[in-house]
């Protein structure tokens, strides 16, 4: 069994959906569990529906939903070449349910309504793709993942109940493979024990695929993207990036920790726990080698990994009485950061001060500084960048920091971090 995941970019046009079909046809001997996310930018559009609904701008919400509906109906008709197909009844049911939600008075919190509305994108995309594949001979079964993925009610970032989900995978998913080789399910969504829809966090479909891979004991997971694989830096920020042919799970977790937007960070653990390799491949050309992320990757082959976080603020916290910054003070400081939900990207201690680098989020910083003010003097520096380089080579750092002012630097054997202006 293999698990495949196709993201929004691979479903953005009719041609791309057809291309996804060709990729699947290249695996005739495999059982495939295919996880699909919403088409193109549908999730962003649905977020707008949810926002307007919650602000009681129902007319606007309905209009936006109608636009999404029209677009999906057109895609479905183009792919199937007809409007006479049971798919259209299924799509109509999804829209009717969403319209019912829009007809409610928002009595519960925003996150709840967000989850009832935004998961629609995945229901639509999977239904359309499944029907189209069946029509062109890629025989498959459509699965409503909400009957399988049980979660808590932490809306917008729901947590999987692994025990119940494993049982439902065994009872409801495995038997499907007795009759067909391909099962198509939604990424990103699940359901509570009260049958309320939930989402698993933005870009959560990679994670959904990893949950399936873990619970099905899959031989591998493949994320099909519009890029060649993982690169050693963001090509939008750096020239001369190179592809990474193989990399370890821990290394990818480190990269995500330092701020690389590679793969949804939650994706790695379910795979690592069962040593299931994760392939990142390009759906535009399946013969490109791509990247494999696995437990026993050879770290010596890695190029330098470069991660740049822009728009950083360096806050320096000094004790008002010029006392030493000792463990008790540091623990007070951390408690305030935790309480204000501010994530620290890098820290440095000195005798009477503590400095840390955080993302520039003015509202959060204002509250943070207010809370710190009681015990500490605060100074801060904005408009900075945090550069992290793992496995750095001589010469590279000079090149990356040329003409820049370095405010702080930390080095270990494998990693260097610089805050620069
Ligand atoms: N469609 C969802 C999103 O855009 C989930 C995903 O793409 O992974 O966030
Ligand atoms: Mg998406």
Image (cartoon, rainbow, N blue to C red):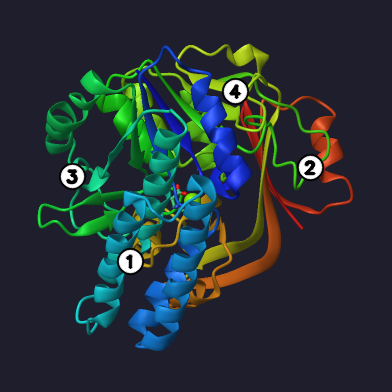
* C-alpha separation, residue under disc 2 versus residue under disc 4: 19 Å
* C-alpha separation, residue under disc 3 versus residue under disc 1: 19 Å
196 to the left or right of 203: left
What residue is shown with label 3?
Answer: 147
What element does badge 1 sit on? helix
* C-alpha separation, residue under disc 2 versus residue under disc 3: 44 Å
Classify the position of the N terminus by image quarter: top left
Mark 2 sits near ligand 2, with its Cβ under 8 Å away: no
Mark 4 sits near ligand 1, with its Cβ under 8 Å away: no
Q: Judge depth for marks 3 and 4 and give the one in front.
A: 3
Q: Judge depth for marks 1 and 4 and give the one in front.
A: 1
Contact, CB < 8 Å: mark 3 with mark 4?
A: no
- Any mark on residue 238, and which? 2
Q: Position of residue 198 (x, y in %)?
A: 26, 56
* C-alpha separation, residue under disc 3 versus residue under disc 4: 32 Å
What residue is shown with label 1?
Answer: 95
140 to the left or right of 178: right
What residue is shown with label 4?
Answer: 291
Q: Judge depth for marks 3 and 1 and give the one in front.
A: 1
Q: Is residue 74 visible?
A: yes
Q: Earlier in the sequence, mark 2 or mark 4?
A: 2
Contact, CB < 8 Å: mark 1 with mark 2?
A: no
Q: Position of residue 385 (x, y in %)?
A: 69, 55
Q: Judge depth for marks 2 and 4 and give the one in front.
A: 4
Callout 2: 10 Å neighbours few (<14), some, many (20+)?
few
Q: Position of residue 287 (x, y in %)?
A: 65, 19
Contact, CB < 8 Å: mark 2 with mark 3?
A: no
- Any mark on residue 268, and which? none
Q: Earlier in the sequence, mark 3 or mark 4?
A: 3
Q: Earlier in the sequence, mark 2 or mark 3?
A: 3
């Amino acid at each position: 069994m293999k698990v495949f995941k196709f993201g929004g970019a691979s479903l953005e046009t009719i041609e791309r959906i057809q291309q996804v079909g060709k990729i699947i046809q290249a695996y005739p001997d495999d059982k495939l569990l295919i996880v699909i996310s919403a088409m193109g930018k549908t999730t962003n559009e649905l977020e707008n529906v949810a926002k307007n609904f919650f602000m009681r701008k129902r007319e606007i919400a309905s209009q936006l939903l109608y636009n999404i509906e029209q677009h999906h109906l057109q895609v479905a008709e183009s792919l199937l070449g007809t409007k006479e197909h049971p798919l259209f009844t299924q799509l109509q049911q999804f829209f009717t349910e969403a319209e019912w939600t829009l007809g409610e008075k928002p009595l519960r919190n925003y996150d709840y309504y967000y989850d009832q509305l935004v998961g629609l994108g995945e229901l639509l995309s999977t239904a359309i793709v499944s029907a189209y594949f069946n029509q062109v001979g890629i025989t498959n079964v459509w699965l409503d993942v909400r009957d399988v993925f049980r979660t808590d009610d932490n809306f917008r970032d729901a947590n999987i109940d692994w025990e119940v989900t494993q049982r439902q995978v065994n009872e409801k998913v495995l038997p499907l493979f007795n009759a067909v080789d391909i099962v198509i399910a939604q990424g990103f969504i699940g359901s509570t024990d009260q049958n309320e829809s939930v989402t698993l966090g933005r870009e959560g479909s990679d994670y959904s695929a990893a949950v399936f891979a873990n619970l099905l004991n899959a031989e591998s997971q493949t994320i099909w993207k519009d890029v060649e694989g993982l690169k050693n830096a963001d090509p939008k920020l750096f020239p001369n990036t190179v592809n990474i042919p193989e990399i370890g799970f821990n290394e990818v977790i480190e990269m995500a920790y330092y701020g690389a937007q590679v793969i949804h960070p939650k994706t790695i653990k379910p795979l690592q726990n069962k040593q299931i390799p994760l392939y990142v491949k390009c759906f535009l050309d399946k013969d490109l080698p791509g990247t494999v992320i696995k437990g026993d990757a050879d770290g010596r082959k890695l190029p330098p990994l470069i991660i740049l976080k822009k728009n950083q603020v360096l806050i320096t916290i000094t004790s008002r009485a010029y006392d030493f910054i000792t463990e008790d003070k540091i623990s007070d400081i951390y408690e305030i950061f935790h309480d204000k939900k501010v994530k620290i990207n890098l820290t440095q201690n000195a005798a009477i001060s503590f400095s840390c680098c955080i993302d520039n989020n003015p509202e959060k910083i204002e509250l943070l500084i207010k809370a710190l003010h009681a015990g500490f003097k605060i100074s801060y520096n904005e408009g900075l960048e945090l550069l992290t380089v793992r496995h750095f080579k001589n010469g590279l750092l000079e090149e990356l920091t040329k003409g820049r002012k370095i405010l702080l630097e930390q080095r270990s054997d494998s990693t260097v971090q610089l805050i620069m202006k």
